[in-house]
Image (tube, rainbow, N blue to C red):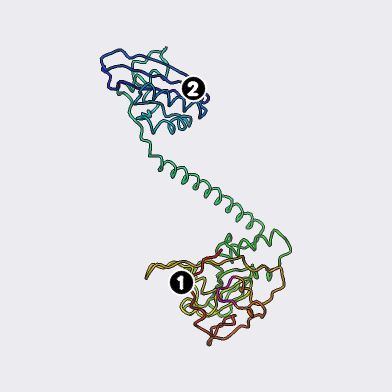
Amino acid sequence: MEAIVERVGGVDVGQATVVATVLVGAAHERARKETRTFRTVTRELLALREWFLAKGVTHVAMEGTGIYWRPVYELLEDAFDMILGNAHHIKNVPGRKTDVKDSEWLADLARHGLIAKSFVPPKPFRRLRELLRYRRKLMESRTAERNRLLKLLETANIKLARVASNVFGVSGRLMLQALLDGGATPAAMAALAQGIVGGSMPWPLIGVGVLLGIAMILVSHDLGVMAETCDRIAVVYAGQIVEEADTKTIYDAPRHPYTRSLMLSVPTLEGPRRRLMSLPGAPFDLRGEPVGCRFAERCPIAEDKCRRETPPLVVVRPGHVSRCHFALDPRAMQFEAVVGA
């Protein structure tokens, strides 16, 4: 069979060494052969690349088995037309002699166009694929650990999943840490709620392990679920109700900066694009003695009195209360999104 490639290289990749063969010759001539062995360290693989370039090699053939071929392929792909063959296909090509080295056999097959090229995605896509595969493994590992923890809680008859829609959210993690620390009472656990508590009755009870037959209690950070499920909503920050009203009022006319910040953190599909809200600083430390407003250090409209004086629960209108010094000033709640540090 007539050759179609005049200068071709074949590479047999192992764990420690790489055997390379160069075949050079016109299509109607018998090819001249030269074989060298290189170690698989980067310095010697670059020497292999320079040797191929010095010989005028245009095509390089190799088998795609295991993972050892990948670094060799990465260093050669920019300089040569790479032919990555399927090992099963190459093994079944007839005519191989038992005393022929793998690298020479690969080069001879490539010289005559007898190796079907396997598809190798471009380098950026390979990088992205590796990243996504690693991310998937991490997510699977995290899910498995979370399920193991939920099973452990149920085994210990700790019904945290019954009252928290997301056991691994901010509130759930604080409650889990309190359980690890030991000595946590239901009231202390309830004080760790950081988010929205809603129910179908005014002033819902907030607690862990408290079951009510006359109402539904939902603890969640999911604003969409709260909007669809609850008649009234109590917004909780640092174990303290900071605003309570019917669901429509909470979403359309909040009178507490924390509630307003929650609304600004939700992306919208209508109207112009806007920056989403994120709160600076850290949550209020419940281990210390509360002084002033618990939200003051993260509040975009806080003043000195907010840090000195505890705000009372102000009645904005019947059925709507807010724990803020500026609750009766609707203009104070019209701040835009602030990006946290």
Closer to the camera, 309 or 185?
A: 309
Q: Which residues are magenta?
A: 298-302
Magenta stretch contains residue 323: no
Mark identifier at residue 272: none
Picture quadrant of residue 152: bottom right
For the residue marked with disc 1, what is the amino acid? Glu
Give residue 336's position: percent from left, percent from top.
48, 73
Closer to the camera, 9 or 194?
A: 9
Picture quadrant of residue 325: bottom right
- Is 272 located above or below residue 325 in the figure? above
Give residue 252's position: percent from left, percent from top.
46, 78
Closer to the camera, 119 or 193?
A: 119
Mark identifier at residue 38: 2
Give residue 264's position: percent from left, percent from top.
48, 70
Label 1 sits on a secondary structure element that is: helix
Whether the residues at callouts 2 and 1 have beta carbons within 8 Å, the answer is: no
For the residue marked with disc 2, what is the amino acid? Phe
- Is 274 located above or below residue 46 in the figure? below
- Identify the residue under disc 1: 228
Give residue 142's position: percent from left, percent from top.
56, 51
Label 2 sits on a secondary structure element that is: strand
Residue at the farthest right position: 183
Name which residue lies at 40% across and 67% down. Answer: 273
- Mark 2 is surrounded, within 10 Å at the Cα level, by few (under 14), some (14 to 19) or many (20 or more) other residues, namely some
Name which residue lies at 44% across and 45% down. Answer: 128
User: CA gap, disc 2 to disc 1?
Assistant: 67 Å
Q: What is the magenta segment's predominant secondary structure?
A: loop
Name which residue lies at 38% across and 13% down. Answer: 97
